[in-house]
């Protein structure tokens, strides 16, 4: 069975596949593509959640600006540098600084951090700080930042507008265009989507995967849609969100779907999406995400790694902050220290017969 040059229609048919024997063919093909293109190494990228402030009003995210029940924090320079030092001690090749869209993290502050991390540790620096002005992107790249992660979440404009309202004085953003600009500034670019957004059809998700190929992404993250209960979508649809029941009308309503056309935000559907992502973009770096571990703490990350993924992101955020970075509730491993997370990840990787990668682990293009 050939998995080369998958069309949107073929991708959709695999997303709908339920036969266990046929799905095993998909898992095997994705794992073989992973081995052929990125090898056996699983690269560890130390995640630092540096701020829980956010100016946006995304419909599902617990960090949204009007969530008054969330205790906010912003890590200090020294706290962030201590996490980067820990990453170097553990042998990681990359640190990932992630936050809400927080303009309290000024261009100068992040520039100084990048310089300090590079000078002291030599690690690759990945940023995931939301939408920012071009001037910020350029300054951070000049300071030495290597990669920028910005999920486009869905390539369907109406669905995107529903989950990412523009906010006061803004227009709907074009994240696909922003990713192209980031590449032009010299970054490796990472993006991705959520699986099972209320109103997301199988055809929409299939088009998302085709978009991965067309964008020539260096890193692709996919994970199940999980909303926070203190958000409009969480209150209307529940965190499980098997389908849109928001009751919204007009332009704000979820796209109307035929019966059986809503993509579930299930563990199985996420594995299908990871596997198909590997097949459409075989040389990309693909993480097995925390959200998968949240759905299946015992084996979620491992199954992701066996079905196409080659990256994990051990969390270096101090536990007192980690529990406050509540994008969605009940995240996996929020009480672990960075050292505990590192030890656990290494053991899990070795248990499935893979090796822990060394170095920055950038994409190796053919």
Image (cartoon, rainbow, N blue to C red):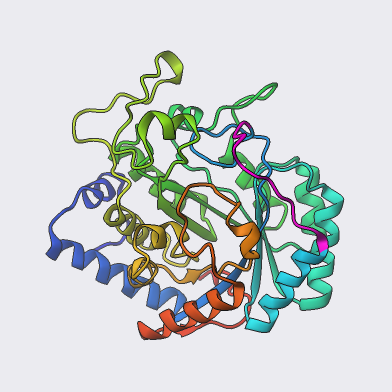
Q: For the magenta stretch, what is the residue range?
A: 66-77
Q: Is residue 58 above or below residue 5?
A: above
Kindly report the secondary structure that dominates the magenta region of the rendered protein.
loop
* Residue drawn at x 60%, y 27% as measured from the top left: 166
Q: Is residue 118 above or below residue 331?
A: below
Residue 1 in view, yes or no: no
* Residue drawn at x 49%, y 57% as measured from the top left: 220
* Residue drawn at x 36%, y 19% as measured from the top left: 247
Q: Quadrant of residue 46?
A: bottom right
Frontmost residue, 272 versus 352:
352
Q: Is residue 346 left or right of residue 117?
A: left
Tell me residue 354's x, y (percent).
Answer: 41, 84
Q: Is residue 180 above or below residue 124?
A: above
Q: Residue furthest top?
A: 250
Tell me residue 362's x, y (percent).
Answer: 59, 71
Q: Is residue 32 left or right of residue 130?
A: left
* Magenta span includes 139: no
Frontmost residue, 338 versus 13:
338
* Residue drawn at x 19%, y 35% as measured from the top left: 260
């Amino acid at each position: 069975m050939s998995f080369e040059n998958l069309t949107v229609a073929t991708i959709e048919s695999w997303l709908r596949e339920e036969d266990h024997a046929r799905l095993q063919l998909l898992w095997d093909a994705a794992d073989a593509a992973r081995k052929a293109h990125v090898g056996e190494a699983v690269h560890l990228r130390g995640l630092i959640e540096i701020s829980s402030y956010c100016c946006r009003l995304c419909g599902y995210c617990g960090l949204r600006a009007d969530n008054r029940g969330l205790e906010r924090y912003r890590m200090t320079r020294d706290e962030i540098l201590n996490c980067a030092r820990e990453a170097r001690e553990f042998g990681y090749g990359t640190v990932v600084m992630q936050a809400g869209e927080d303009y309290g993290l000024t261009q100068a502050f992040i520039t100084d951090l990048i310089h300090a991390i590079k000078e002291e540790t030599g690690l690759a620096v990945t940023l995931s700080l939301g939408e920012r002005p071009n001037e910020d992107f350029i300054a951070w790249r000049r300071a030495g930042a290597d990669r920028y992660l910005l999920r486009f979440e869905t390539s369907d404009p109406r669905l995107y507008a529903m989950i990412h309202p523009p906010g006061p004085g803004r227009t709907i953003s074009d994240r696909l265009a922003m990713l192209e600009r980031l590449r032009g500034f010299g970054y490796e670019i990472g993006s991705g989507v959520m699986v099972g957004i209320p109103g997301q059809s199988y055809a929409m998700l299939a088009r998302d995967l085709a978009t991965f190929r067309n964008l020539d992404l260096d890193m692709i993250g996919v994970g199940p849609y999980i909303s926070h209960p203190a958000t409009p979508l969480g209150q209307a649809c529940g965190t499980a969100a098997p389908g849109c029941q928001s009751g919204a009308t007009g332009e704000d309503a979820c796209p109307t779907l035929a019966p059986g056309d809503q993509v579930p935000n299930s563990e199985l559907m996420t594995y299908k999406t990871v596997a198909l992502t590997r097949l459409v973009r075989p040389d990309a770096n693909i993480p097995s995400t925390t959200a998968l571990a949240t759905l299946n703490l015992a084996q979620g990350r491992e199954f992701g790694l066996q079905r196409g993924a080659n990256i994990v992101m051990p969390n270096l955020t101090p536990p007192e902050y980690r529990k406050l970075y509540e994008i969605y509730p009940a995240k996996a491993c929020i009480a672990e220290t960075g050292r505990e997370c590192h030890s656990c990840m290494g053991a899990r990787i070795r248990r499935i017969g893979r090796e822990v990668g060394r170095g920055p682990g950038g994409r190796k293009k053919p």
